[in-house]
Image (spheres, grey):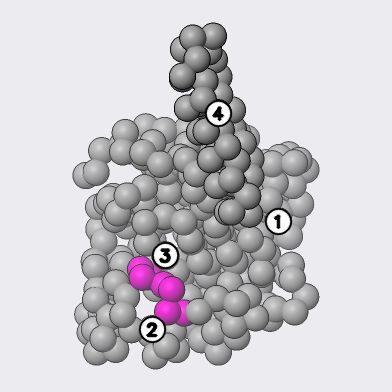
Amino acid sequence: MLCERNKVVMNQEQLIDQCANKDTCGFFLKILIVLAVILITAVTCGKIVRAETPSLKISILFNNVSYKENLKTSWGFSCLIEGMDQTILFDTGGDGNILLSNMRQMGIDPGVVEVVVLSHIHADHIGGLESFLEKDPNVVVCLPESFPATFKQAVRNRGAKVEEIHEPKYLFEGVYTTGEMGDWIKEQSLVLTTSKGLVIITGCAHPGVVNIVRKARGHFKADVYMVMGGFHLLSMSDSEIQKIIHMLKELGVQKVAPSHCTGDLARTMFRKTWGNDFIESGIGAVIELSRQVGKSTLLDKN
Ligand SMILES: [Zn+2]
Ligand SMILES: [Zn+2]
């Protein structure tokens, strides 16, 4: 393919040279030929727009919601985020063996992870960390500052670095945390910036999914494209869930991918409300989005 492409380019360049020697070939004809070369080159390479918009890929590695039959479901949540400047493991599920087995089945090498973000202290989100660090200790673990000192030391003893999070914070290009939220159970959510708006990833959403979306939207002053993860609506009634749906719609949430502790009733109601903008996100689901480079630099880094 590369050879064919080069041949096309060479032939076009030769044509430009030939034309340049003749009075009949004007400037505009040369421009047209150059544009044709660019178009042919792009088509033959299959990279017309994507060269400018790298893909953001979110793979669900641990979930109690089923999706891919060959993967094991278990109570908890974890996902891998690829396509930002660094590869992130968000939460680690409740069991390291299941996490690593699902990663293997999905063809994901634990060694690709550079940053681990832990949403909150519950075992169904941190349970897989120890087994994961045995495979890949060369990571930075971003965890809520309120985690016990013994936990932080255990992470350091495994060879990983610890970054304590309290306030909303810029982690690296396009990736932010809401900071610790909630009174009783402190939890952070992850915020990714894309050309379509914010992508907010929650662990259990103990501080309330509406509060999390409101904080992210207010702090980053951007529209919310997608909210995904556990929404913690398991014990809520039909009318309570309807209120949450109404508020998320009012906040302009375009797409939702609820799973984990959201509950079947809430997931059914979300699916009905969002229709084609409801994204199935059980175990093994892969969500791909385009991410325009440079857009996120519009946001402040504090
Ligand atoms: Zn929890
Ligand atoms: Zn949970």
Residue at 50% from the left image edge and 44% from the top image edge? 51
Q: In which quadrant is the N terminus drawn?
A: bottom right
Residue at 63% from the left image edge and 61% from the top image edge? 286
* Residue pointed to by mark 3: 87
Residue 80 x, y percent position in the rendering = 50, 66
Pick whichever of labels 2 and 3 is earlier in the sequence: 3
Mark 1 vs mark 4: in front? 4
Residue 9 x, y percent position in the rendering = 54, 39
Q: Is residue 28 above or below residue 290?
A: above
Kindly state the secondary structure of the residue where label 2 is placed.
loop
Q: CA distance from mark 3 to mark 4?
A: 45 Å
Residue 210 x, y percent position in the rendering = 50, 44
* Residue pointed to by mark 2: 136
Please, what is the three-letter code of the amino acid marked with disc 4? Answer: Leu
The residue nearer to you, when weighing 150 against 44, is 44
The residue nearer to you, when weighing 51 against 266, is 51
| Magenta-highlighted residues | 110-116
* Residue pointed to by mark 1: 280
For disc 3, the neighbor class at 10 Å (few under 14, some 14 to 19, many from 20) is some
Kindly state the secondary structure of the residue where label 3 is placed.
loop
